[in-house]
Image (cartoon, rainbow, N blue to C red):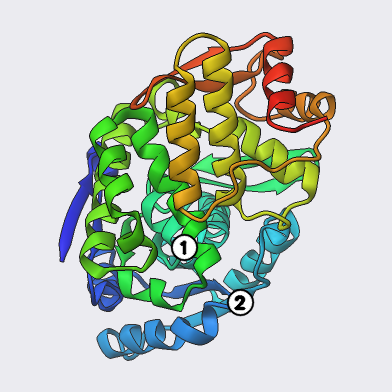
Amino acid sequence: MIRINVELGERSYPIHIGQGALEEVGKELARLNATRVLVVTNTTVGPMYAGRILKNIQAAFPNMPAAVVELPDGECYKDLEHIQTILDAAVRCGLDRKSVMIALGGGVVGDMTGFAASMWMRGISFIQIPTTLLAQVDSSVGGKTGVNLPAGKNLIGAFHQPKSVLIDPDVLKTLDPRQISAGLAEVIKYGFLGDCQFVQSLEERMPQLRALDPAAISDVVAHCCRMKARIVKLDEREAGERAKLNLGHTFGHAIEKATGYGVWLHGEAVAAGTVMAAVLSRRLGYISEDDVVRVRRLVKACGLPEVIANINAQEAWLLMQGDKKTLGGIVRFVLMHSIGESVIESVDKQAAVDAMHECGWS
């Protein structure tokens, strides 16, 4: 078992990575002196793992009240209506201030559970048990929670750190290849934004990662969690360094909104957005065409789309202006100054639109 600590003073918490991590849930609830538990999951993950989690809880605490609430599966359900579903379940379960919510699922379940926990009785503890690669390497760590509005992605939310993160790479075996590829979009992001050696390692090991080789997956998940923990320690509320984790996301969120949430997986949209960020960076004179080719090659090696076309550039720009990363009406992009070095800059509208046109947007 690999243990990584997210250092945030009195709000620090452990990340446990390894086979059998799900069995740690009883120990974590004991550490938190939990009184009651609500497991939040979805209709895909719940039937596979919720019973196992409840069994572990009951083995450690035979008399602890514990319940499960299942949400529909999909980004399109990441909204206030389904936050209400979680809160209604909290009422039925009788959660008090020492109760714990458990997020059992991917990034959508994690974001929604964390947000619900931040609101219940002005904030109770929650534990992340991520079951997708994307959630294991990124969204389960760092405390960013929230839901979408018709106007944009994650416009409502809160910073609410989990009390622990339990990551078992074995659960990835139940994912289809598309979900694995979507998770790899967030993995390669860590390399492009600040670790050239990691990019080279991914280029060499991509076949093993897509095949879920246990050693390769555990190593990469741990590497990403260490990077995320370091960044969160430096910039918990995304005032500077942490914003670089949005590489590819300004374009990616526009793709998700323009095409309809759920048409493209988040990781697929981010992958295409990362290629677009590379193209924009090259057009601004920061990187070479060879660098863009390298980005495209690794995205393709992940089994991800290099381009998601047939989107109107002018409409996309308006969507970007409503993105939560926009300040004072100025759209900000994470750009590459090299493979492994990133910066955050505002970009002239025409430069961004020209990059969109180059990538096949109308």
Q: CA distance from mark 1 to mark 2?
A: 23 Å
Report the mark closest to the observer, 1 or 2.
1
Say what amino acid the circle numbered 1 marks.
Ile
Give the image location of residue 253, x and y in percent: 66, 39
Say what amino acid the circle numbered 2 marks.
Glu
Give the image location of residue 287, x and y in percent: 44, 16
The residue lying at 63 percent from left, 16 percent from top is: 327
| Nearer to me, 236 or 173 | 173
| Nearer to me, 339 or 13 | 339
Q: Quadrant of the C terminus?
A: top right
Q: Which residue is mark 1?
A: 180
Please report whichever mark, 1 or 2, sits nearer to the chain's N-terminal start: 2
Which image quadrant for residue 129?
bottom left
Mark 1: secondary structure = helix
The residue lying at 36 percent from left, 89 percent from top is: 55
Q: Name above or below for residue 202 compared with residue 65.
A: above
Give the side of residue 304 with respect to residue 80, left or right.
left
| Nearer to me, 130 or 85 | 130
Give the image location of residue 202, x and y in percent: 31, 47
Q: Quadrant of the N terminus?
A: bottom left
Q: Residues within 10 Å of mark 1 (few under 14, many from 20)?
A: many
Q: Residues within 10 Å of mark 2 (few under 14, many from 20)?
A: many
Mark 2: secondary structure = strand
The residue lying at 64 percent from left, 32 percent from top is: 251
Give the side of residue 137 with respect to residue 60, left or right.
right
